Amino acid sequence: MKNSVTRQFIYTVSLIFVLQVVMLAGVFNTFYKKSKADIKALGVSNMKSQAAMVENYLNKGGDVLWFAAESVDYMLKSGSDSEQIFQYLRGATYQMQEQFDANFTGIYGCLNGEYVDGSGWVPPEDYDPTERSWYKEAKEAGGNMILSKPYVDAQTGSIIISYSQLLSDGKSVLSLDIVLNEVQNITEHMTMEGVGYGFIVDESGLVISHADKNEIGKDYSEGGEWMDLLARDQSDDGYGFETKIDGKLCTVFTKRIVNKWHVVIVSQNTLMYRDLHLQIFASVFSTILVYLIIVIFCMYSVRSISGAERRRQESLEQIKQLNTNIIRSLASTIDAKDRYTSGHSQRVANYAVMIAKRMGKSEADQRVIYYAGLLHDVGKIRIPEAVINKPGRLTEEEMDAIHVHSVSGYDILIDIYDDERICQCAKYHHERYDGTGYPNGLEGENIPEIARIVAVADSYDAMASDRGYRKALPQDVVRKEIVEGKGTQFDPEIADIMLDIIDEDPEYRLRQKENWIRNVLVIDDEEIIIRDVKHILEKMEDTHVVGAQNEKEAVSVLKEMEIDIILLDLKMPDTDGFELFEKIREKWSVPVILMTGDKSRKTIQRISDLRIDDYITKPLNEAITREAVHGLLHRIDTRF
C-alpha cells in the first residue's frame, strides 16, 4: 500500500514536472520570441526618436534660412540697399547664434552679384561667390531650398553643411552654414538602453558623426560593407535587421532622414538580450514563484515599452504643434499675398467656431474646426500673387489656377495632420450643397461636415469684407444672399445657424474692421526714443503711438485708453523696468516688448524668467522693431 502510494506520488510528481517542463518550454519559447520582438520594436522606436531629434535640428536650420530668405527677398523687392540688407543679416546672425545655436555660424550670400556675410567675414578680392558650390547648387535647384553635401573642415575637423536658397529674382542666393557639433552630441548618446553605439552617414558613405570620434570623416563606401547593409533601407519608416559585424551577431537599427542620410544604432545581440537570456535560464528551474516574477517582469516590460511609446507620441505632438505654428504663420502669409483679404483666414476661423458652438460641438472639435478655418486657403501659396491681386476679370486659365488651390491645400496638409478633417476642409470648402461646386462636385451630406461649416463662414466673410472691386456688403444684403443660398450653395441647417448669428448682431460687428487702429504705448524717459518709435511705426498704417516718459504718465494713459501693446524701456531714472513691468501685468493684460541696451546673460535670463513677450536691443533697428511689433500683434490676433 505504501509502495503504491509512493509510486503514485512519484508518478504524479513526475507527471506534473513533465507537464510543467512542457508548459514552461512552450510558454518561455513564446515569451522569448515576443520579448525579442518587443526589444527590437523598442529599438526601432528609440531609433525613430533619435532620428527625429537629428532631423528637427537640421530642419531648424532650414527654417531659420527660410525666414531670412523671405525677409531679404522682401527687402530686395522693397528697394533696400546693400547696407540695409547687410545690417539685417548681421543682426539676424547675431540673434540666431544667441537664441538658437552658436553652431549656426552665419547667414551669407550673393545678392545682385555682391557677396554679403552676416558674420562680418570679408572675402579676398579674387573671391567670386557665383563660382562657389553653394551658389551653383542653389541656382540649379530652381527656388527649392537645398542641403549641401557635408564636408570636413580642414582646420577644426568638424563636419559642416550648408543650406542654400535661391531668391525670387533668380540670381540672388542666401546660405547658412551649420557646424554639426550638436548632431555629434546627439550621436554620442545613441544607444539601446546603454548598449551599442550610433553613427550617421550621408548617401555617399561619408561619416558625419560617430560615437567614436576617430571615425568621423571616413568614407564607408570604401570596402562597401556598411553601404551594402544600409542599402536595404529604402523606406523612411526605420527598421532593424541582424548581421555579423567583426564576427559577432548584432542588430542594426537604421532610419533614413533628410537628404538620404542614414541614422544608425548598432547593438551586439549578446549584450542587448543578455537580461532576457538570464531570466529565461533562471525561470526554467524555478517554482511557481518564478511564474509570478515572470509576470511582474512582463508587466514591467510592457510598461517600459508603453512609456517609450507614450514619450514618442508626446514628441510627435510637439512636432505637430510646431508644424501647426508654422502653418498658422503660413496662413497669415497667404492673407498677406492678397491686399484685399487681410485677416480673412482668422475671421473665417472665428466664425466657424461660433457656428460649431451652436451645433453643440465639443471643445476638441471646435479646436479642429478653428484650425480648419485658419488653414482653409493654405493652397493659395501656390497661386501667383499677380493672379490673386489682379484687379480685372480673370482669364479661364487664371480661374483654373484659383480653383486648384483647394486641392493644393489638401496636398500640403495631408502630410502634416493625422486628423483628416482639417485636410478635407481645405479640399472641399468650395463644394456646393446642390453638387455644382468644385473640385469634385460633391452633393449634400457627402460633403464633409467641417467643409460645410467653413463654407458658410468663408462666404459670410467674403461678403462682409472689403474687396478690391467693392466695399463690404450691407448686412441685409449678406443675410439675403445666405437665405437664397440655403439648399443650393449652403447646408440649410448650418445656414440657419449663421442667420441666427446675423440676427443677434444688429450693429453689424461681425465684419472686417474699418480703420482698425492699434494703440502702442512707448514708455521711455527720452523723448527722442519715443519720436524714433513713432517714425519707425509710421509705415504700419494700423498703429497709433502714444508716449509716456515715466511711470505716472504711463499709468495715466493705461487708465484713459485701451492699449494693445507696450514698448517699455528697461532702465529709466528712478524707475526699474522690471518692476514697472510687474506692476503693469498685475492690473492690465497688455503684451510688453522690453527695450534695453543691456545684453548681459543675467538680464536676458530675467526677461525669460518673467515670461516677457519679447525684447529688442538699443539702438533700435527700424526693421527689427517694426517686425517685433507686427509679430506680437499677429500672435495676439491668432490666439485661440
Image (cartoon, helix red, strand yellow):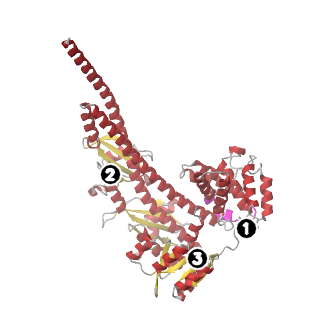
Under circle 2, the secondary element is: strand
The percent position of residue 595, horizontal first and vertical second, equals: 49, 79
Q: Which residue appears farthest toward the front when viewing the image?
A: 1
Residue at (25%, 32%) from the top-left corner? Answer: 286
Q: Tell me the quarter of the picture where residue 183 sits.
A: bottom left
Label 2 sits on residue:
198
Label 1 to label 2: alpha-carbon separation: 58 Å
Picture coordinates of residue 520 (x, y %)?
Answer: 59, 78
- Whole-angstrom CA distance, mark 3 to mark 2, is 49 Å
Query: Mark 1 belongs to which amino acid?
Result: Gly
**What kind of element bears circle 3?**
loop
Q: Disc 3 versus disc 1: distance between alpha carbons?
A: 25 Å
Q: Is residue 177 left or right of residue 375?
A: left
Nearest the eye: 348 or 588: 588
**Along the viewing direction, whichever of 141 and 413 lies nearer the viewer:** 413
Residue at 30% across, 28% down: 24
Q: Residue at x 48, y 56 (%)?
A: 319
The residue labelled by disc 3 is 79
Residue farthest to the left, as pictured: 3
Query: Does the stretch in magenta take in 427?
Result: no
Q: Nearer the N terminus, badge 3 or badge 1?
A: 3
Residue beneath disc 1: 468
Type of amino acid under label 3: Gly
Q: Which residues are magenta?
A: 380-395
Circle 1 SS class:
loop
Q: Earlier in the sequence, mark 3 or mark 2?
A: 3
